[in-house]
Amino acid sequence: MSYKLENSQRGEKYNTIFSKISPAQRRNRNARSRWRSRLLLGLYLVLMILPIYWLLNMSLQTNSEILGSMTLWPQNLTFDNYIGIFTNSSWYMGYVNSMLYVAMNMLITICVALPAAYAFSRYTFIGDKHLFFWLLTNLMAPPAVFLLPYFQLYYSVGLFDTHIAVALAHCLFNIPLAIWILEGFMSSVPKEIDETAYIDGYSFPRFFVKIFIPMIRSGIGVTLFFLFMFSWVELLLARTLTATDAQPIGMIMTRTSTASGIDWGTLAAAGVLTIIPGILVVYFVRNHIAKGFALGRT
Amino acid sequence: MNNKVPNNRAWLLVLPMLVLVAFSAIIPLMTVVNYSVQDVLGPNARFFTGTEWFQSMLNDDALQAAFLRQISFSLIILAIQIPLGIGIALIMPKRGWQASAVLILITLPLLIPWNVVGSIWQIFTRGDIGLMGWGLRELGIEYNITRNAGDAWATIILMDVWHWTPLVAMLCYSGLRSIPEAYYQAARIDRASKWAVFRYIQLPKLTNVLVIAVLLRFMHSFMIYAEPFVLTGGGPGSATTFLSQSLTTMAVGQQDLGPSAAFSLIYFLVILLVSWVFYTTIMNMQKDKPPHGGA
């Protein structure tokens, strides 16, 4: 009993020997600084959410209420703006189009990036450093530079206004990004694992699919998160490469400004709907992004 | 890291990726190079012009002004976002359900399509229907982003800080998470102040992620297009016209193939050069430390 007591008090004893501040004061001070940082964080979050809240607020109002008076929350709650979007195929097809090309892009990118990243993390080969550097330069290419050539290229091969055209165009920055992130994760897996697997008689494809990919699962999750993010938010290329059949939602939103003014309610509702896929994706990877955001390079 | 095996068959693993990237990067880039040295008057009438377009682009007053605006914009947002991002990462909760909740909330702006970000802020700052515009007017502050260039600039910077600080914060947060608890214990035994812990433990451990953060933020801010385009349309006048917008106006709006191609190449090279100089400087500064990461 007495031993236990001493053990639990050891921390405080330690403090009283070496510092002029009493343990009670120290605890008090820590609590106060914790509250201060909570407060600051809360303030930041509130300021951050405010513009999004305003969009949500407007999407639940009628246009006459939006323009008529300043209301901090919807007085007459209405879902008409959302119903309008979900019952009009030219509206909701925009979401379908966007999701289709994002999904295609994620699939293509991860399939070609996994083996390439493995090659970069495990082997040296002629020109590997140059190749890697050249890949990274593609991340720095402004999409605006590629606007015109893309239009001509995809038009000439007959892919203009298809989902695959946008998916391929987004590979420009997504493949280098994926290889860069995956390479970091793969390099943190010890090489001995590969060697042991080969000694055990695994062929390369079997080892890669059965052992290696499960080991870097969270890395792949984070990579997919980034691929989704950059493909979903990009509009300049997606807009240029599509006309009617594969038009992204971002482009359809510009339709809300008509001769009689802007349809604010529908614009806001469409905006809110573009945020939802993002929330879902973050929710699924929330346990991995904290570690994975550093891209395996801390 | 250092025990890579020489194996040229690894090219086979890289090949599929190479074909795809070549299709979406090399061919278009060659088209741009091709246009930049020619004057295209019609399908069969094109003349070799050499470096003429490059010279005229480098001496173009409007473009020089856009370039200066672009540089100042990138520097301002870096100066705000990097310290703010570090600060937020330091006060984010480390565990429990609050950590997940804060994480999801903070990442939110990153996943909103860029033109929607523009729309959100356009709505938010309007004097008649936006909370911020209305609030400022009620407080008696003259605020109009379509007329006053200063207001437009402040709003675009605020929007970018809102939009991209989460990226810096998340990078720093994951950097902080990788610091072993033993370091903090040692610091507590030494009676290190909070500042000393930050300066000698946290900041050095953050160097790698901060390099990534600065590079990413520089690159993306230098290519910014959709957000200011939707928010201000480059106005008032050309006060917030950045390089990407000048380029798209020239290439798509006016169909000036030669000049816009020359401009594209200069634009691309500037980003490459700045990123390369920054990266090599940092890497040289860290030379005596053991290397981290792959790139």
Image (cartoon, coloured by chain):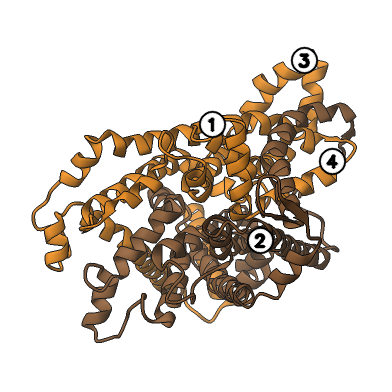
Chain colours: A orange, B brown
Q: Position of residue B74 (x, y in %)?
A: 59, 70
Q: Dot 1 falls on which chain? A: A
Q: Which mark is residue B239?
A: none
Q: Position of residue B6 (x, y in %)?
A: 91, 33
- Disc 2 element: helix
Can you see residue B103? no
Q: Which residue is mark 1?
A: A164
Q: Position of residue A103 (x, y in %)?
A: 49, 32
Q: Give the Cα distance between marks 2 and 4.
A: 22 Å
Q: Give the Cα distance between marks 1 and 2.
A: 30 Å
Q: Are marks 1 and 2 on the same chain?
A: no
Q: Nearer the viewer, residue A69 or B87?
A: A69
Few, some or many residues within 10 Å of mark 2 (<14, 14–19, 20+): some
Disc 1 + disc 2, Cβ < 8 Å: no
Tell us which disc is closer to us: 1 or 4: 1
Q: Which residue is mark 2?
A: B215
